[in-house]
Image (spheres, helix red, strand yellow):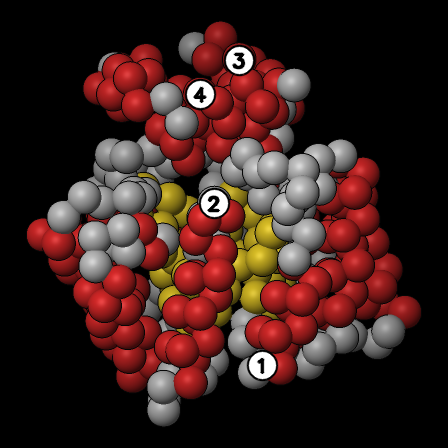
Amino acid sequence: MLRAFFIALSESTSLRAIAERSRFGQRTSARFVAGKEVVDAIRATRAVNLFGASVSIDNLGENVTNADEARASARLYHDLLDEIAANRLNANISLKLTHMGLDVDEKLAYDIVRALVAKAASMSPKNFVRVDMEGSPYTQRTLDFVHELHRVPGNEGSVGAVIQSYMRRAESDVDKLLSERIRIRLCKGAYKEAEDIAFQKKSEVDANYVKLMKVLMKSGVYHGLATHDEAIIDQAKAFASRENIPRGAFEFQMLHGIRRDLQQSLVKDGWGVRVYIPFGTEWYPYFMRRLAERPANVLFLARNLLRK
């Protein structure tokens, strides 16, 4: 019930406008969002790299309404790749196709993302673009984009997809991506979806996550397991041990500002960890979906806001 409440809030344009302008809203989001500018994301990335974890940087935004906005978003990502290289950071980038203009002009969005992937692939060391998954109306189009981009000569290994374990189609999508050895970030999912296309019970979502997680871990492709669920993390570690899967064959992925203690503990134990660092002014939908995804974050925030 609490999850549905925060998902509904994430879709409210009026509340979003108020929150993104208010000092209180910016203060409450600061734990999960690195800041508004590229320099803020770079500073946060450097701090994460210092304790041994890698990073994926995301400029928050989605559903741009014109080509100029899409091109401006793309320029910022080109700047990010330049800053990653200049500062020799252990980081890649994550983006949403609707932020790159998918709702405006599909060809424009494809050309924008293709240019970013080509730039990442040409870097030394080679970098990587994660194409984030959005709500179900975009699922097939997003996967089609990733498959097509991955087939471009030189792009292999430099572009990947996100699979949400609450989607009933997830297993089939994983099989198709693995057939082309495309890297996957596995997460549970944080959008409101109908029962006929998505599991509704946490137990079902978790069971599908673990099932797909094991497939990914044995695939021989480097994937990301995005979760803060310690029970699932323990299952992944135990499975890796039983199946003789090296600790460097995959990575755990966690969100900026959530369970830093667990992130650092995993790194100390020799597991790969990547921290997802978002930044930008359009933080409201992301912030609300994080509260929906993990209601314990509500209590976490309340405790931190009461501290001086």
Q: Which residue is label 4 attached to?
A: 9
Identified by mark 1, the residue type is Arg
Q: Nearer the viewer, residue 295 or 189?
A: 189
In the figure, residue 284 lies in which quadrant?
top left
Alpha-carbon distance for marks 2 and 3? 28 Å
**Mark linked to residue 135:** 2
Mark before the other along the chain sequence, 1 or 4: 4
Mark before the other along the chain sequence, 2 or 1: 2
Q: Residue furthest left?
A: 68
Q: Residue at x 67, y 38 (%)?
A: 195
Q: Residues within 10 Å of mark 1 (few under 14, many from 20)?
A: some
Residue depth check, mark 3 versus mark 4: number of the one nearer the observer: 4
Q: Position of residue 252 (x, y in %)?
A: 63, 57
Image quarter where the C terminus lies is top left
Q: Residue at x 61, y 75 (%)?
A: 176
**Mark linked to residue 302:** 3
In what element is the residue under mark 2? Answer: loop
Residue 54 visible in the shown view: no
Q: Which residue is label 1 attached to?
A: 181
Q: Position of residue 293 (x, y in %)?
A: 59, 33
Alpha-carbon distance for marks 3 and 4? 18 Å
Identified by mark 2, the residue type is Gly
In what element is the residue under mark 4? Answer: helix
CB-based contact (under 8 Å), mark 1 and mark 4: no
CB-based contact (under 8 Å), mark 3 and mark 1: no
Mark before the other along the chain sequence, 3 or 1: 1
Mark before the other along the chain sequence, 4 or 2: 4
Q: Position of residue 259 (x, y in %)?
A: 60, 37
Q: Residue furthest front?
A: 196
Mark before the other along the chain sequence, 3 or 4: 4
In the figure, residue 268 lies in which quadrant?
bottom right
- Taking the image as shown, residue 289 lies to the left or right of residue 299, namely left
